[in-house]
Image (tube, rainbow, N blue to C red):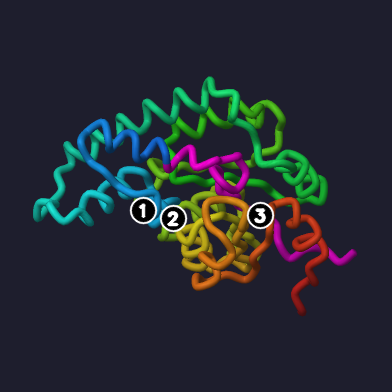
Amino acid sequence: MAASPVRLVIFDMAGTTVHDEDFVNVAFRAALSENGIAVTRDEVNAVMGYPKPLAIRRLLERRADAPAAVSDEAVHRLHEAFLHRMNAFYATDPAVREIEGATATFRRLKEAGLRIALDTGFSRSTANVIIHRLGWDAAGLLDATVTSDEVERGRPHPDLALRCMALTGITDPTEVAKVGDTPSDLQEGTAAGCRYVIGVTNGSHTAEELRPYPHTHLVSSITDLPALLLDAPAPST
């Protein structure tokens, strides 16, 4: 087997490595609804993967009755309501589990010498709850985790991926694969110059919904990644 040209794989969380039956979408709509704001599933899906405060701001700005400028206070209030719901859900709900094969995929890639990072539109508090609940913090599988409140710009900008690279000692984006289930994941990986930008189609978006966005591959699940990445040809010299 030829050595993989990839040294770092950056995975999204909800919908990519963490099972999501519309949990995030439902929490978004519930948090807004309890504050008198009705949005549809499709409206929320259109901003999925973005930093959550930015996603809330975008949803508010798209309302026909939106003021000229959405206040920071309103965004903060709604984000706090969303965080409360999400953190409680991920800490206690029995439906919370990894995407089937996630840990095995991490382990297979680690055994081949690749570094594993998670990046997410969640805040650090939510990400920590999930990582601890799934036991990934104790398994030695993750080389870095980066959340949207730890970078200047979230998706679709490259900041999350670039921070993952910095934390894992990778300086060349052509040694990186970015994996996610949303258009903003694909845009992030492309903006960062990643060698592989891989969409998974068993999360929040279908293959048809992801196909218009820049990518190198679409796969049905992250369990397809070891064969894709470890059998990839080495770069010519």
Q: Position of residue 12 (x, y in %)?
A: 56, 48
Q: Which amino acid, mark 1?
A: Arg
Name the residue: 35% across, 54% down. 43
Name the residue: 31% across, 34% down. 31
Q: How far apart are marks 3 and 2 (CA)?
A: 16 Å
Element carrying mark 2 = helix
Mark 1–mark 2 CB contact (< 8 Å):
yes
Q: Earlier in the sequence, mark 3 or mark 1?
A: 3
Is 142 drawn above or below residue 9 in the view shown? above
Q: Residue 159 carries which label?
A: 2
Q: Residue furthest left?
A: 68
Q: Is residue 236 left or right of residue 64?
A: right
Which stretch is magenta? Answer: 1-25
Q: Which of 44 and 224 is in front in this view?
A: 44
Q: Residue furthest right?
A: 1
Q: Residue 8 carries which label?
A: 3
Count up the numbered dots: 3
> Residue 149: which quarter of the image?
top left
Q: Which mark is residue 153?
A: 1
Q: In this view, does 178 lie to the left or right of 31?
A: right
Q: Which of marks 1 and 2 is nearer the N terminus?
A: 1
Is 90 drawn above or below residue 102 in the view shown? above
Residue density around tag 1, few if under 14, some if 14–19, many if 20 or more, within 10 Å: some
Q: In this view, does 199 lie to the left or right of 67?
A: right
Q: Distance between the residues labelled 3 and 1?
A: 21 Å
Q: Which residue lies furthest to the bottom in this view?
A: 237
Q: Is residue 67 left or right of residue 125?
A: left
Q: Which amino acid, mark 2?
A: Asp
- Decide whether residue 14 is among the magenta residues: yes
